[in-house]
Image (spheres, rainbow, N blue to C red):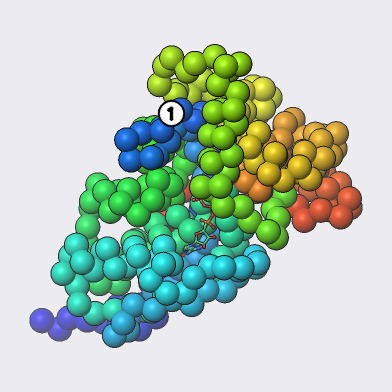
Amino acid sequence: MGGIGPVSLAASDDGVRVRAPGKINVFLEVGDVDDEGYHEVATAYQAVSLYEEVWATEDDEITVEVTGTVVLGDVPVDDRNLAVRAARLLAQTTGVRTGVRLEIRKTVPVAGGMGGGSADAAATLVACDALWGTGLGSAELQRLAARLGADVPFALQGGTAIGTGRGDELSPALARGRFDWVLVPHEEGMSTPIVYGALDEHRRRHAVDIAPRRRQPAVDADVLHALRQGDAGMLAAALRNDLQAPALRLRPDLAAILETGERAGALAGIVSGSGPTLAFLAADEASAIDLRVTLSAAGLHALHVHGPVQGARTI
Ligand code: ATP
């Protein structure tokens, strides 16, 4: 057959480009530790318009290069990189023997509590699946994603979702409209295990004063209602993150910035995931633009994003 036209040849020469979003946990309740030492959580994820881009091209081995607009700090460029782990897992699962060159362009703050590494892994699964022609369905990609980390399935799926178990058991959440956020990232990231450790330590020390948790963690009905209505005011009143208190104990300077944002017109501010990125919810797009300008004028690095947005997609 007279087969491959110039268009598909050009496409394969250029490799595959995929982008995947960072996330905000608009609700995160942390329960007890399971037998393997992981915390049971109930969370409401919202994917926001701050993206990681992965460009995958054919190569003999699996390699990665990381650039971006954020402080790259200690992002590993060897087998510890979550994108490399994603490519290896896909190759092993499908029996692919060729490699891939991964070029990651990060705009999600590193160790910022917005799931940037997870977005890289999700984007890599989609990119390599297309590059290698392995054609896995979305259910199979989700299964691989869950093996890479609790936040990876959500970065693949995007939108708005409820995560239970370790955060990786996703169910869809109805969401309407758009929510406008102003993010204040920090150059120095925070380790997720250390923040969970600080929460455990606090709960141990105050076990007598803290009422025992009798039920499994669950997302508050108010949050689901606010998302369904697309009502920013209602969502602002329902925002909750159990990791916020330990994150603020570890980084007391964040409390003053939370106050600054709320005084500057945010409906509410919250620590994103395990921090230290702060997310301020605005009433609408115009208020978010004003808030970003005010925070920038106060000398803070502030970014205006919106959600929900789609998960990992070829661009
Ligand atoms: P978490 O998903 O644990 O909430 P986070 O969003 O706070 O993480 P990430 O930027 O995803 O933070 O990464 C946390 C750590 O994972 C980094 O400090 C880094 O050492 C390691 N890491 C591995 N691969 C990557 C990657 N592709 N991008 C960023 N960090 C990575």
Horizontal relation, residue 88 to residue 105: left or right: left
Horizontal relation, residue 12 to residue 266: left or right: left
In the rendered image, the vertical position of residue 247 relative to residue 4, given as above or below = above
Task: Measuring from the top left, give residue 284's x and y in whole percent.
Answer: 71, 36
In the rendered image, the vertical position of residue 72 relative to residue 114, given as above or below = below
In the rendered image, the vertical position of residue 32 relative to residue 38, given as above or below = above
SS under mark 1: strand
Dot 1 amino acid type: Asp
Picture residue at 77% right of the left edge, 56% below the top: 301
Nearer the observer, 202 or 171: 202
Picture residue at 83% right of the left edge, 48% below the top: 295
Task: Measuring from the top left, give residue 310's x and y in whole percent.
Answer: 46, 48
Picture residue at 43% right of the left edge, 36% below the top: 39
Quadrant, the N terminus? bottom left
Evaluate whether residue 121 shows in this view. Answer: yes
Residue furthest to the right: 297
Task: Measuring from the top left, give residue 75's x and y in whole percent.
Answer: 53, 68
Evaluate whether residue 162 shows in this view. Answer: no
Q: Which residue is mark 1?
A: 32
Quadrant, the C terminus? bottom left
Picture residue at 61% right of the left edge, 68% below the top: 73
Q: Residues within 10 Å of mark 1 (few under 14, many from 20)?
A: some
Nearer the observer, 299 or 20: 299
The image quadrant that residue 179 belongs to is: top right
Task: Measuring from the top left, give residue 119's x and y in whole percent.
Answer: 46, 56
The image quadrant that residue 12 belongs to is: bottom left
